[in-house]
Image (spheres, rainbow, N blue to C red):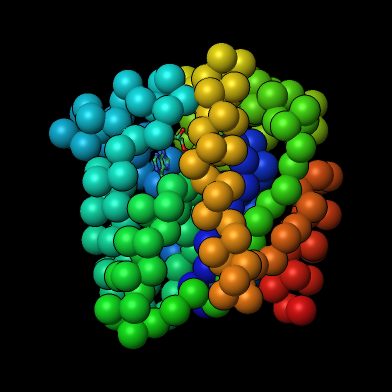
């Protein structure tokens, strides 16, 4: 299964991807996670990406495309992968298409998680993750268990200001790639509003249908 999760920031892509990879036994490739790891390690890639990420801007295509094309060529992706947060621009979508074509494979599904802008800011600013496990919670919608408060961290770009910038980029750069996948007949639109379990059930029904 080769698939992509698309949606605005805070739509629940990371949460759903983590659940779906267990079901399908494929690697979860999150460009946001890869870039955050590079920033943490202080690599050249991380240094190049840090400023864009803090401001809620997109990291330049040439940086991200190379990173993903290299990643999906690895052995663990031979039977499939789940891309989360890539492609996010038309050049990224075109580069992925070229790379898959050259490898003689194609995408099976693109899941679009739909959440209205009005809900996004509340979702993003309340988001926290566990510093050790990476588990994602929301202070109101998916509360963490009691006693782990000192283990919860907030992403640097989960502020209201960066969130507004990320939403603008989503609408101007990422939403325009969706019709391409519609034209291929592999687009599955899923309502992303609701508890993670409910959204997961919808995603699985959409993939099965
Ligand atoms: P995410 O965790 O997917 O929300 O990504 C966090 C941030 O990483 C984004 O706001 C961008 O700054 C950067 N980023 C992640 N994926 C991409 C991508 N495909 N293209 C450009 N920038 C990206």
In the image, residue 132 sits, relative to residue 156, either above or below, namely below
Tell me the quarter of the image containing the C terminus: bottom right
Q: Quadrant of residue 139?
A: top right
Query: How far across and how far down the image is residue 36, in percent?
Result: 37, 35
Tell me if residue 49 can be seen. Answer: yes
Query: How far across and how far down the image is residue 22, in percent?
Result: 58, 66
Q: Residue at x 59, y 38 (%)?
A: 171
Tell me if residue 29 can be seen. Answer: no
Q: Residue at x 69, y 66 (%)?
A: 188
Q: Which image quadrant shows ligand 1?
A: top left
Q: Nearer the viewer, residue 37 or 62?
A: 62
User: In this image, 198 relative to 60: left or right?
Assistant: right
Query: How far across and how far down the image is residue 2, in percent?
Result: 49, 73
Q: Residue furthest bottom?
A: 104
In the image, residue 119 sits, relative to residue 181, either above or below, namely above
Q: Residue furthest left?
A: 44
Q: Residue at x 53, y 37 (%)?
A: 172
Q: Residue at x 83, y 54 (%)?
A: 198
Query: How far across and how far down the image is residue 80, in percent?
Result: 44, 75
User: In this image, 133 relative to 15: left or right?
Assistant: left
Q: Quadrant of residue 92?
A: bottom left
Q: How many marks?
A: 0
């Amino acid at each position: 299964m080769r698939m992509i999760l698309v949606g605005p920031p805070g739509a629940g892509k990371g949460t759903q991807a983590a659940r779906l990879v267990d079901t399908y036994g494929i690697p979860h490739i999150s460009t946001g996670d890869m870039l955050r790891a590079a920033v943490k390690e202080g690599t050249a890639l991380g240094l190049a990406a840090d400023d864009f990420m803090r401001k809620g801007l997109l990291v330049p295509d040439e940086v991200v495309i190379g990173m993903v094309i290299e990643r999906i060529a690895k052995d663990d992706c031979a039977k499939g992968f789940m891309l989360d947060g890539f492609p996010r621009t038309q050049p990224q979508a075109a580069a992925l298409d070229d790379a898959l074509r050259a490898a003689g494979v194609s995408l099976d599904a693109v899941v679009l998680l739909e959440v209205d802008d009005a809900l996004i800011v509340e979702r993003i600013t309340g988001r926290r993750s566990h510093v050790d496990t990476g588990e994602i919670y929301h202070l109101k919608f998916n509360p963490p268990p009691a006693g782990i408060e000192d283990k919860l961290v907030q992403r640097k770009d989960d502020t209201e200001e960066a969130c507004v910038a990320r939403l603008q980029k989503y609408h101007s750069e990422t939403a325009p790639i969706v019709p391409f996948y519609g034209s291929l007949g592999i687009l599955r639109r899923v309502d992303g509003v609701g508890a993670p379990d409910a959204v997961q059930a919808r995603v699985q029904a959409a993939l099965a249908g």
